[in-house]
Structures are given as structure tokens and as C-alpha cells.
Image (tube, helix red, strand yellow):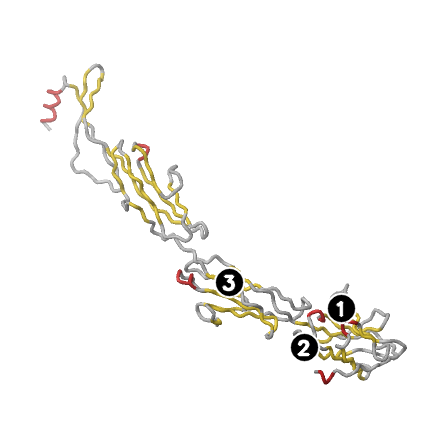
Amino acid sequence: MAGLRTPALAVLLCLHWHHVIVKAGTLFAVPGDDVFFNISISIVSSNDGFIAVEKHVDDKHKVMVFVDITNPPYISAQYRDRINFPGIIGLTEMYFWLYNVSIEDAGEFRVVPVGIRKVLGSQILAVAGRPGNPTIVERTIPQVYKDHTLECEALSSSRPETNGFNMSFIWKLNGTILVNTMVRIVQGKILIIRRLQREDRFDKFTCIAYDSDRLPSNESMYYQIDPYYGPAEELTLDPPNRTYFVEEGSVLASITCSADCHPHCIFSWDRGVRHGAKLNLSVIDKTKNGIYRCTAKNPVTHVSFTTALEVILTTRIGTERADRNGFPVTKVSLRVIVVFAIMSLNLVLHFTSFTDRALPANMVRYASI
């Protein structure tokens, strides 16, 4: 564009205008571009006055670009040597070149009458910047057998902030650009991994953001999936027994509950047993009889499963001596062990307690049955 950098032409206009804002399209550029402005303006009749071009960043901040009041036109310091202003065509169009644009040049360029708060026409210059370093963020918990969503986040440095640039993204898996598949779905800044597997923990993802095809961001730090899993429905007990017949007064060896989990599961036993994977019962008595349940819970996914075992208290069959109304009594006692399945006995034993004094009579009565 060096050949186009001719001295700006002086144009002195004596105009009287009717205020009409003419909205034009947006010019898109990257730093270093030479941009041609062609702004439609609305002027009804002429009168004394001068036209200027202002750059508005917002409603409170503006910069005077140039005024066609002198020969050559007055140009502000930051635009000096970068403006080529041939003039106004037919009182309806203003055009000029702005060379070697930068982010600081972005904004709305307004054609205004000097000293009067009116806008004759405008055009927006949007300048793309290189996005900030992107980061990959988890939008879901990485859980085995569930879909997992990642998002590539990057801050735009393009100006103005409402610039019309559509930021685009590239995803990479282990250094190779990703395309849509049934397993990995790319939706701009979103990446969806279908039905996560434990083997996916070896995958490394990166992303790159663009505000313009010519201005990519740096590549993000790699993100490696760490899938959470477990516990499975069947917990493991060591020893593996699910039923323990224990004599009263004895001690039951420790029983350990375990599960395949990531991160490590939290274990607890019910019936007031302290938290932890081990079940330790002291001297067995009737209070220790019954069912004990172990629950394993994943602290991240909150998935939990429970398994159970039963401790059954047993006692020996024996004889007891007691005094009843002053007479010694001999009693035979049978203590029944209760398990989940109760067996029916066809033979019913009819024993009654009797004193030594009544022994002969009772023996005769039972013998006659």
C-alpha cells in the first residue's frame, strides 16, 4: 500500500445539513492491515461549516482523527502519516485510507459537523487480536460409562468488545486435530466424549482459539482425563464368608470390606461400628448376633453399594440344676440356631420338666403313649 500514501487533499466544505444517522457495515481487520473507509453521509443543503472524523470507543471516549479545515487537513498525532484523505464524493460519501491498523484503532468512526453534536454517518472498525492463552475446563464429572464435556475458554483481545468476530476453536487429541466422530463430538469450544472409558485416562487434549483465521492463540496446556469409577455392585469381603457361626464368648477375626474405586471409596459398617473398611467384633455375646452391612461410597461421584454378612450366635447343649419350690429339678434345654431358612422337623420331642419324686409316674404315662 506504500504507493497509495499520497498527501491528503484539502477539502473545505460550506454546508448546511439535516441530521440523519447513516448506519454502515463493520470493517474487519487484523493488526497491520490497510483499511479503506467509505462512509455514506446525508447532507441536505449547504451552509458554512466543516466536517471532521471522530473515533468513538464508547459514549464517553472519543478521539479526533482529522478535520478538513486546513490544507492539508488537520490530523491528530496518533494518525499522522497513516491517513490518506482524498475527500468527499458528491457530498454523500466520505472515504479515506487508514494504514497499518492496530488494536488501538478499533472503534466507531463518525463523520460529524465541527462544533455540532450531530452524526452524518459512521462505520465501525473491528480489529482482531490474538486471544489469550486458552484453558480447558471440565463441565461434567469424568465418570466411567457417562458422557463427559470439556470447554475451551479463551479471552478475546479483539476490539471493540462487541466486535462481531466469531471466535473459533481447534481441538487436538495427542497432538492430532480432532474431527467429529461417534465417540468425540466437536461443537466449537465444546468437546463431548461419549460414554467415557477407563482407558481414556491416557488421552491428552489441547485446544487453540481464533478471533481471526490469521491470529491463533497459543496452544493450551494439555488436559488429561482422570476418569472416576467404582464401586461395583458386588463388594469384596476378606475372608469371603457371608455367614459366621460363632460361639458365645469367642472372638471373631477381622473382616475387611473392599471395592475397586477411583478415588478410594469411603467405607462404613452399620450397627454402630466405627467408619472404616474393617469389621472388628470383640467378645461375642447376644448383642453381636445379627446382620452387618458394609457400604462403599465414591466421594466424588457419590455412587454407593452395600453388601452384608450375618453373625449367628451358637451355644452348647447342656444340663442345668435349679431349685423349684425346694425340690431339685433336672431340665434338658435345646437352643435353636436361627438361620434365614428354617427347617421343619417332622419329629416333635415332647419333653417336660419333672421332679425326681414324680419320675416313676411320668415314665409310666409316657410309656403308654
Question: For residue 122, what is the image quadrant?
Answer: bottom right
Q: What residue does disc 1 label?
A: 56
Q: What residue does disc 2 label?
A: 33
* Residue 55 coordinates in the image, percent (x, y): 76, 70
Q: What residue does disc 3 label?
A: 150
Q: CA distance from mark 1 to mark 2?
A: 20 Å
Question: For residue 92, what is the image quadrant?
Answer: bottom right
* Residue 296 coordinates in the image, percent (x, y): 39, 47
* Residue 291 coordinates in the image, percent (x, y): 32, 40
Of 352 and 139, nearer the camera is 139
Name the quarter where the N terminus is drawn: bottom right
Local SS, label 1: strand
Of 322 and 369, nearer the camera is 322
* Residue 146 coordinates in the image, percent (x, y): 44, 60
**Residue 91 visible to an observer of this rendering:** yes
Local SS, label 2: loop
- Amino acid identity at mark 1: His
Q: Residue at x 46, y 51 (%)?
A: 300
Q: CA distance from mark 3 to mark 2?
A: 35 Å
* Tally of numbered discs: 3
* Residue at the limit of the structure toward the top, as seen here: 326
Of discs 3 and 2, which sits in the foreground? 2
